[in-house]
Amino acid sequence: MDRNTTQDGVPPDGTATNESPVSGTEAAAAASESHEEGHGHEKEGLATLAVGAIGVVFGDIGTSPLYSFKETFVGHHLMKVDQLHVFGVLSIVFWTMIVIVTVKYLFLVLRADNKGEGGSLALLALVSRCMSDRRWTYVMSVFGLTATALFFGDAMITPAVSVLSAVEGLTVVHPGFERFVLPISIAILIGLFAIQSRGTAAMGKLFGPVMMFYFLTIAILGVIGIMETPGILWALNPLHALRFFADDPLMAYLALGSIVLAVTGAEALYADMGHFGRPAIMAAWLCLAFPCLLLNYLGQAAMMMHRPETVANPFFMLAPDALRLPLVLLATAATVIASQAVISGAFSVSQQAVQLGYLPRIRIRHTSASAAGQIYVPMINWTLLGLVVMLVLGFRTSGNLASAYGIANTGTMFITSCMFGVLAFQVWKWPAPIAGFFTCLFLLVDGAYFTSNMTKIPDGGWFPLLGASITFTILSTWSSGRRIMRDRLAEDSMPFDIFLGSVCQKVRRVAGTSVFLASNAEGIPPALLHNLKHNHILHDRVVVLTVETQNVPHVPPEKRREVEDLGHGFYRMIIRIGFMDEANVPAELGAETRAGGPFKPMETSYFLARQTLIASKRPGMAIWREKLFAWMVRNAESAMVFFRLPTNRVIELGSQLEI
């Protein structure tokens, strides 16, 4: 099934718009209060969804044991393998998984679902809808865009470092395999991105059992390691983490930059919530992923205490010699699956960005008839593949990539903590002491990890920041360009009452219905004026149609359409959709009878305005950003395809417009 979802309009082709992508309306609030999640999760059992979540959502964090301990001790800051450091690192890992993954994301942030959807933009829409101060709304918008940009930066690195770290396990089996690491890694990554079009659900069913076997395997290996040094269990005491910071504060602070690799992928839990739902993600983490990860980390630490030389690659050293090659193959399969978490999250975030007006129209395919959150975005998929292959060829080893890994992830987590604080105080109205405690706790932990990772910038951390900066520029340029475009179009717009009173009565009318897609619910759309100027006729029934995206994922059918009779055969219609809904304009018209009766497909013509943008020195954006905006407009997907208009019933009218 291939359906194109829609956004709240793109003024350059006169289709539809929302006054502000983060302001909302009373209708949106009503829809928010009355509408259920509507993701289709209730149609599948919790166990089935939990298995799918294991395969898609927890791949990233599940493969962290491959490299987190190794990079902490033998990465860019060598650390002595003794009780102080091993117990300290293990204690920090354990309590970070408790505080960040379990408490922050699973128990609190996942409650901030925007009618079933998660991620930075869903959180932004949820918070902004409930805020009246426009200054704070602007601050939240910057936070949301920055977090989204950082998430895309992280999505570039996760597949590369995960797959490379697993394939490098071949060098533990035999040093002669080293020359095959890069070509095998690239081949695996190409295969992974090539199968994305099959859909998240199909891959979840395939990947889930593999990841369950992987988690159980690393848990068994961890138990074997614990048996060598049972005293390692005492390391879970938080006093060992405090003692580490007290006795060696500089090394402890620098080590945070590598320790955080143990929880990379936590943000993907939130971004992927729309794919599987909160209950399934919580069940998968608490019942399988968390216990198995903890056992493996305990086993690695115990083995390192007993045999310090294994610090070179403790994950694979846990396995007996005869089982290392099978473990490499299993770990490689797991890291392929690990990449799925951020890829699926990138698809969801891209769709939300399109709908909320931060990205131009792009093709989005729905891959499930029952779960609306499962989608495939071809442009994002192939762009990520190109960037990932560049990273593998440029950095060549997982150790080098680890220096670039973590900055984008921790930056996103820190911004999420800031937005959570606003949510707890302003939206949920928690008591100040409770909201303040959790907000300060999360900001302290995330802030420490983020600033520690900033020390990686010279060693490769600049790459995800560069990628995030480019992404932020694209998101903000499209949003600002749309606002400027609305203002320019409004300057030339004619009020409807003047038009009806002085123009339409003097024009010849012909049989049929014309639908003019408008970017603004006020005034005459440019396409109508251009048609009148060139053809000097009007249809018997004229509908001015605006599609608005609300700050909720879904709007129920009974609240989707609003019709106003303007007289003289003119009607104004507003179609309201959620940012996870599709805009099928012919289907919406087919369900509407209040605008002069039913719409007959072969008697209805659709008029679109297509502006050629010209960058100018008028107040707005910098010239280079105006040119970038104009380029994005030219390359956006056709409004005819995006809104599912019949190809033989569409007329496009072009003009030039300075911005």
Image (cartoon, rainbow, N blue to C red):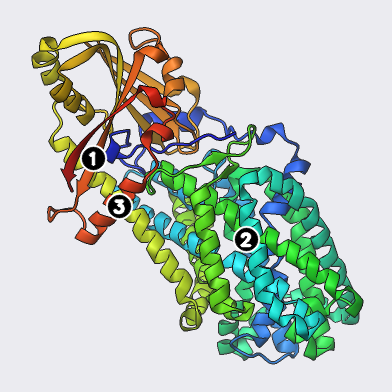
From the viewer's perspective, is residue 66 above or below residue 551? below
Q: Position of residue 645 (x, y in %)?
A: 41, 27
Work out how far the residue at label 3 is from the one at label 1, CA to CA, in angstroms: 12 Å
Q: Nearer the viewer, residue 420 or 243?
A: 420
As drawn, is 40 to the left or to the right of 475?
Answer: right
Q: Residue furthest left?
A: 502
Q: Earlier in the sequence, mark 2 or mark 1?
A: 2
Which quadrant would residue 87 be assigned to in this image?
bottom right
Is residue 442 in view? no
Q: Position of residue 178 (x, y in %)?
A: 71, 82
Residue on which the image places disc 2: 190
Residue on which the image places disc 3: 631
From the viewer's perspective, is residue 26 above or below residue 260? above
Q: Which labelled disc corresponds to residue 611?
A: 1
Q: Which labelled disc corresponds to residue 441?
A: none
Three-letter code, disc 3:
Trp
Quick one: quadrant of the N terminus?
Answer: top right
Q: Position of residue 408 (x, y in %)?
A: 50, 67
As drawn, is 546 to the left or to the right of 436?
Answer: left
Is residue 462 in view? yes
Q: Residue at x 52, y 60 (%)?
A: 384
Question: Are circles 3 and 2 on residues that touch, CB within 8 Å?
Answer: no
Q: Residue furthest front?
A: 648
Q: Earlier in the sequence, mark 3 or mark 1?
A: 1
Mark 2 neighbour density, 10 Å: few (under 14) some (14–19) many (20 or more): some
Secondary element under disc 2, as helix, strand or loop, is: helix
